[in-house]
Image (cartoon, rainbow, N blue to C red):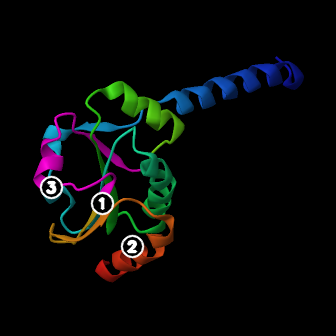
Amino acid sequence: MNRTSSRPFMLLLLALLSTAVLAAEPDIRDIGTFSLDTYRGKVVYLDFWASWCKPCQKSFPWMNRLQKKYPSDRFEVVTINLDRKREPMMRFLEKLPADFTIYHDPSGHIAESFKLQGMPTSYLIDRNGKPVKRHVGFYSDKTGEIEAEIEELL
C-alpha cells in the first residue's frame, strides 16, 4: 500500500477513534463507596447537583477549570448527583462533560446528611476532611472569592 492509498484509511481510523473517545461514558461512582476519608490530605470542593438545576449548568465549566488549575495531589473536585434516575444525569453529562469525580446518590442519603438548602450546594473540605465553607447556589461573580478560599486552604 502506498502513502496516497493509506491516507483515507488513516483518516477513517482517526475518525473512529475520536468518536470512541467522545462517546466514552463518564466515570460515575457508586455512592456506597463515597467517604471524605478517601480524600484526606487534599482540599476538596464538594458539589451537590442535579440535571434539572440551571445554575449547575453554569458551574460545570468552572469546576472543570478548577480541577485543572490546582495540583491533583493537593486538590480535587468531587460532585454528587441527586437525580433519582441515571438517564437525566447522563443526558446532562453528554452536554456538559465533567473532568472531575462524580458520585450518584439517587436516594439522597448523603445530601440529607449535609442538610442542603438549595441547588447547587457546595462545601470546601479541608485536608483533615472537615467542611469549612458552604456555598448555596452558583454565582459566576463569586468564583474568585471561592478560589481565594481554596488557595487559603491549600
Left or right of 5: which side holds 59?
A: left
Question: In this view, which residue lies farthest toward the front?
Answer: 117
- Give the residue drawn at x 21%, y 69%: 41
The residue under the point 37% across, 25% down is: 87
Residue depicted at 45% across the width and 71% down the height: 142
Label 3, label 1: how many angstroms apart (C-alpha)?
A: 11 Å
Q: Nearer the viewer, residue 53 or 102?
A: 53
Q: Earlier in the sequence, mark 3 or mark 1?
A: 3
Circle 1 residue: 122
Q: In the rendered structure, which amino acid carries the disc numbered 2?
A: Ile
Please name which of the two marks, 3 or 1, marks the residue nearer to the observer.
Answer: 3
Instruction: Report the side of 64 relative to 73 (left or right).
Output: right
Question: Which region is colored magenta?
Answer: 100-121
Q: Is residue 72 above or below residue 80?
A: below
Q: Residue 146 has which mark?
A: 2
Q: Nearer the viewer, residue 67 or 15?
A: 67
Measuring from the top left, give residue 2's x and y in whole percent. 86, 21
